Amino acid sequence: MIPRIVGTAVIGVLLIVTIKRNSPEQGFILSVGAVCILSFLSAAAIAGVIGYLRELADSVGLDAAVFDTLIKVLGISIIIRVTGDLCRDANERGVASAVEIGGTALIIYTALPMFGSVLNLIKALLP
């Protein structure tokens, strides 16, 4: 797995650097393609990690809804990070900032049920 990811990344970067000199737009498109391919190659490892974490969460009695929310938040974070970096690579810092703000809002929205659960727990503990 590691040699595929590293090999793909090195070849992708070499191609991107070479093409970007003559055509920045095509270099950016190639960069997006490389990110997609590397994400696809990483998907199997990520699925294995999520499966292991799910088993671990089940063994300690963590509520499935809480676990699913945490996985969603982590997924959103990764996607927003990669998207923001791609925007910065294209010298679109304003778009990158907007993506990150939108991603943060989406994470907060996704985690709202957990905030409610924590507040209910605190309420139950108070006299």
Image: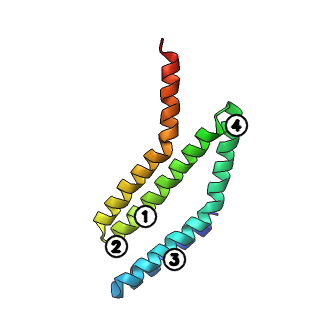
Q: CA distance from mark 2 to mark 1?
A: 11 Å
User: Which residue bears the numbered disc 1?
Assistant: 83
Q: Position of residue 116 (x, y in %)?
A: 49, 33
Q: Do labels 2 and 4 touch, CB within 8 Å?
A: no
Which of the two marks, 1 or 3, is nearer to us in this view? 1
Cβ–Cβ under 8 Å for marks 4 and 3: no
Label at residue 90? 2
Residue beneath disc 4 = 58
Residue type, mark 3 in image: Ile
Label 2 packing within 10 angstroms: few (<14), some (14-19), many (20+): some
Q: Residue at x 48, y 22 (%)?
A: 122
User: Closer to the N terminus: mark 2 or mark 4?
Assistant: 4
Disc 4/disc 3 C-alpha distance (Å): 40 Å
Q: Amino acid at mark 2?
A: Ala
The secondary element bearing badge 4 is classed as: helix
- The image shows residue 98, relative to residue 12, as above or below, that is above
On the picture, is 85 further left or further right than 72?
A: left
Name the N-terminal-most of marks 2 and 1: 1
Mark 3: secondary structure:
helix
Marks 1 and 4, the one that precedes in the sequence = 4
> 20 or 109: which is nearer to us?
109
Residue at point 66% right, 60% down? 44
- Residue lying at the far bottom in this picture: please name it: 22
Q: Secondary structure at mark 1?
A: helix
**Among numbered discs 1 and 3, the one appearing first in the sequence:** 3
Q: State yes or no: discs 2 and 3 in contact (Cβ < 8 Å).
A: no
Where's residue 49, x and y in %?
Answer: 64, 50
Q: Residue at x 47, y 53 (%)?
A: 77
Amino acid type at mark 4: Asp
Query: What mark, if any, has residue 11 been given in the picture?
Result: 3
- Residue 107, visible in the rendered structure: yes
Separation of marks 1 and 3 at Cα, in angstroms: 21 Å
